[in-house]
Amino acid sequence: MEQIITVDSVDDIINIFGKFDENVNRLQKQYDVSVLSRGSDIRISGEEAQVHKCVMAVKAMIERSYTETLTAQSLEYIFSAVEEDALEEALKLTADGICVTVSGKVIKAKTVGQRKYVDLIRQNTIVMGIGPAGTGKTYLAVAMAVKAFKNHEVNRIILTRPAVEAGEKLGFLPGDLQNKVDPYLRPLYDALFDMMGAENFNKNMEKGIIEVAPLAYMRGRTLDDAFIILDEAQNTTKEQIKMFLTRLGFNSKMVITGDITQIDLPDTKKSGLVEAMHILKGIDDIAITRFTERDVVRHKLVQDIIKAYEKSRTN
């Protein structure tokens, strides 16, 4: 069987096929089909079911090539969307971004799971994003916080983490308490630097508009007109996460992120995040979403590593 897709120009074919036809090679390997170009036509031939899948993948590649350079990662996601019959959702990912970094990069959801997460943050007061490393839980939450701040929806951004050591001891480090906990907060600093620039970040920090602090600093406060992010929440105790949740003030949003497969608490302590997921399930205006390895936007090997560990846990 053969199907033909006609594109607007030869340049479009170059963008879709990739450097040294690397994208075509991936398509042919994925679907066991032949993919050739003739002028502005892309000809796909092979077994009917596989040709049909390949046609859907190529159409998705064409759509995404208008807004981004196709990568091995974006192709893998398109392949997954085709297999899960979620291509329509995947094509929506080419819509407008969340915000723009200081380098001019548009930040937007790259997977269906990420898009759902962003939509839930828009629609709910409290959102829990649960999933493995590399799924963009923290980065997208910070992007949404920056967008809300720039749109004057909130007056400040507060980012916090529990200061739990992941197998390393930091107590020997010189400096005061803030100096000692800064290593825990570095991923939050990095995300804000990326989106606001170091100068604006520092200026807003001095004014108290942006606050990056360990979770213990939240006790006794009421947080009004703020976008508040609790990162690495799997390392909170049940008392800590209850304390954090009850800091919520008027006109504020909370996003809680964590990976319940990477709990660094002592064996005698239960994760407050795991408990909160059960206790708060079904409450109106609180949403819980789970990411999978398909939402990982790092190197493809990260997906494979996560799959391997998940397999080892079930065996």
Image (cartoon, rainbow, N blue to C red):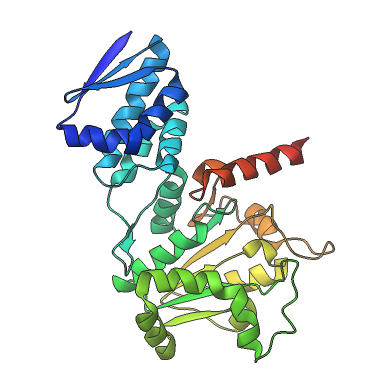
Which residue is drawn at the image coordinates 70% and 43% (left, top)?
A: 309
Residue 91 left/right relative to 298: left
Residue 206, x across and y down, in percent: 42, 90
Nearer-the-camera pick, 114 or 166: 166
Give residue 112's quadrant in the image. Answer: top left
Residue 138, x across and y down, in percent: 50, 62
Nearer-the-camera pick, 301 or 213: 301
Residue 247 appears in the picture as rendered: no
Looking at the image, is 218 positioned above or below residue 311? below
Which residue is drawn at the image coordinates 60% and 51% (left, top)?
A: 132
Residue 79, x across and y down, in percent: 44, 31
State which quarter of the image contains the N terminus.
top left
Residue 283, x across and y down, in percent: 55, 54
Nearer-the-camera pick, 156 or 303: 303
Tell me how many marks there are: 0
Which residue is drawn at the image coordinates 61% and 56% (left, top)?
A: 280
Q: Residue furthest top?
A: 1
Looking at the image, is 97 positioned above or below residue 250? above
Residue 90 appears in the picture as rendered: yes
Q: Residue furthest right?
A: 268
State which quarter of the image contains the C terminus.
top right
Residue 67 left/right relative to 122: left
Q: Residue furthest front?
A: 20
Which residue is drawn at the image coordinates 53% and 43% (left, top)?
A: 300
Give residue 108's quadrant in the image. Answer: bottom left
